[in-house]
Amino acid sequence: MDDYSIVTGKRKTFGVVDYVLFSVILVISAGIGFFFAVKDRKKDSTSNFLLAGRKMSVFPVSMSLLVTFLSALTLLGNPVEIYNYNTMFWYLCLAMVLAIAAASFIFIPFFYELGITSAFEYLELRFSKHVRILGCLLYIFQTMMYVSFVLYAPALALTAVTGTNLWAFIVGIMLIVTAYTAMGGMKAVVWTDTFQAFVITAGLLVALIQGSILTGGFEEAWKVAADRGRVVFDVFDPDPKVRHSFWTVVFGGAIFWTSLFGLNQAQIQRAISLPSLTKAKISLLTSLIGIIFILTIGFMIGIVMFAFYANCHPIKFMNIITKADQLLPLFVMDILGQFPGIPGIFVSCIFSGSLSTLSSCLNALSAVTIEDILKRFWFVKKMNDFKMTLLSKVLVIIYGVIGIGSAFLVSQVSAILQASYSLFSIINGPLTGLFVLGIFFPWANMWGAIVGSLTSLFMMSWIGFGAFANKIRTPTATFDTSGCNWNLTTTTTMTTVAMESSTMLLNSTTTPIPPATVESSDPFYDMYRLSYLWYTATAILINVVVGLIVSFITGRTKPEDLEPRLIFSIFDRLLPCLPESVLRKLRCGVPTKEVY
């Protein structure tokens, strides 16, 4: 205990062995990309680069689906969520079950049967080329915003344990991931993700096991967390302004993650890289097991981490760290610092979470830019397969450079996990609504799609930035600093903080802290308080309602004129046992595939 940061007032840093093991893991990741670049040098085609020739096997794709969106944001943010608030976010595991089920049985089969490379090809088939370009631009902007968060998070983590320059690590991460993605394409991305999935799992397990040992066992850690109000599973308030209630996390979270697993280009691209639809479904369902496992381990680390710092909150003690997002790296250095090399492996676990997401996003951005934008120009259409593949690799590099610049903006925000959900949903919601409108509502036309998505984007931007301007925050639960080593401070500082600590202990509670009741004259204040997990659902609702109204005003699409493959007949798929006379009415006039 003598060398813990809450005793010494100083952070531990990496040793030589940590740097060596950390570097080795990064070299292996890059080496996989170079391996496939050399191995497939004679198969250098656009299809091979973007879709791995549609010949991938189930296991690596499952691992890739698992880690693509369980990035460093999740690995760093979920334990801190438990530490700062309570265990309500644990219901996210149930949300994932609903999301994967919807993706596996509705969206992935729909896109797989269309046989397209880019999901935005569908928007042109269903509406027009203008809607396709609109969707593509929304996706590019949304993904670059997400990339900036994913790039910044692990660099922040590493500087907390090394003291080295933040931007040197940001540039280093992006150079590595850009290099192996540009060299090896989809195969490199998928197999590197598989390797990184094992690194992530190993790193999390080591932190959980050692943390549990030092806190007297997980059962004891749970008891400490329960006594201090962190174990809460009974918030069933239906109010959408409640940050994390059962309904918000399960259903709001399910809609958000369905949009990622079922309607995001990076995930669709992986699913259609498999040789059959059955294997695509199996890979998604297999990834669900890993997703729940990694989420659960992260939440358990949050419980153990809180028990470890229960009597001395590091941020309030001598500013050992400056942001809550640095808590997990600090915790790892405290509990594993005496084992040379182990902290290096854990931090490489955080890096692996980002590398997998970044590589997937860069590969998807390259595919979308070529298929949906550049192929419209005559000089690109005339390119042979070799030049097209080269262009794909150049685009990966360009987006990598842009990602470095956008990471600077992210460095100005706090609470990385919630900020990433909020900003991502502001754009992702309208984009998801665009697909939902086209897939499930046969009356929607081009004008309804355009006006609906732009209205949804405007409204969500208003809500999101209104919440930011009004500083809408849910207060964290209470923290204690009575067990800190105040001998390191001056008498004045010790007295002041000790009084603050005593006040905290008196105010501590075993129930979740309610949102602050701030009086505001703004008539839209309650709208700004909408939970960030409802952003995607709200955006979809606005898009569909406005889109249908505009469609009927401007001349709706006649369902009987639609290609049936462009509409998902949900009743035919999920309730095929219904009588044909009933199904015919539920199709709303859309002809069956056989008739078409």
Image (cartoon, rainbow, N blue to C red):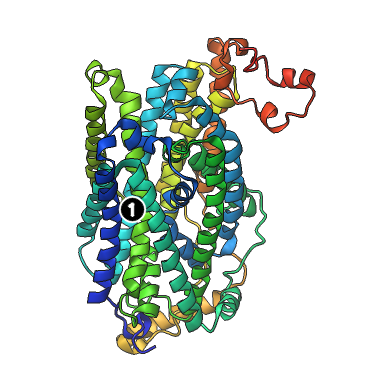
Q: Is residue 126 above or below residue 97?
A: above
Q: What is the tally of numbered marks visible in this picture? A: 1
Going 26% across and 54% down the picture, which residue do you hit?
31
Quick one: label 1, few (<14), some, or many (20+) residues within 10 Å?
Answer: many
Q: In this view, does 554 lie above or below 187?
A: above
Task: For the N terminus, give its image quadrant.
Answer: bottom left
- What percent of the width, then of the height, locates residue 79? 47, 65
Side of 536 relative to 497 (left or right): right
Return the residue nearer the eye: 280 or 555. 280
Question: Residue at image x 50%, y 74%?
Answer: 304
Relative to 104, 266 lies left or right: left
Rendering quarter of residue 207: bottom left
Q: What element does badge 1 sit on?
A: helix
The residue sitting at 30% across, 63% down in the picture is 25
- Please provide percent x and percent y for residue 389: 26, 32
Quarter of the figure with the C terminus: top right
The answer to whether residue 144 of the structure is visible from this angle is no
Toward which corner of the image does residue 182 lie, by quadrant? Answer: top left
Give the percent coordinates (x, y) of residue 490.
Answer: 29, 86
Residue type of the residue flagged with mark 1: Leu
Question: Which of the two residues, 371 or 441, is positioned nearer the viewer here?
Answer: 371
Residue 510 lies in quadrant: bottom right
Reading the image, the residue beneath label 1 is 355
Picture coordinates of residue 171, whole percent (x, y): 21, 53
Q: Which is more toward the observer, 35 or 209?
A: 35
| Nearer to us in this view, 410 or 188 | 188
At 41% across and 51% down in the image, what residue appears?
419
Residue 574 in view here: yes
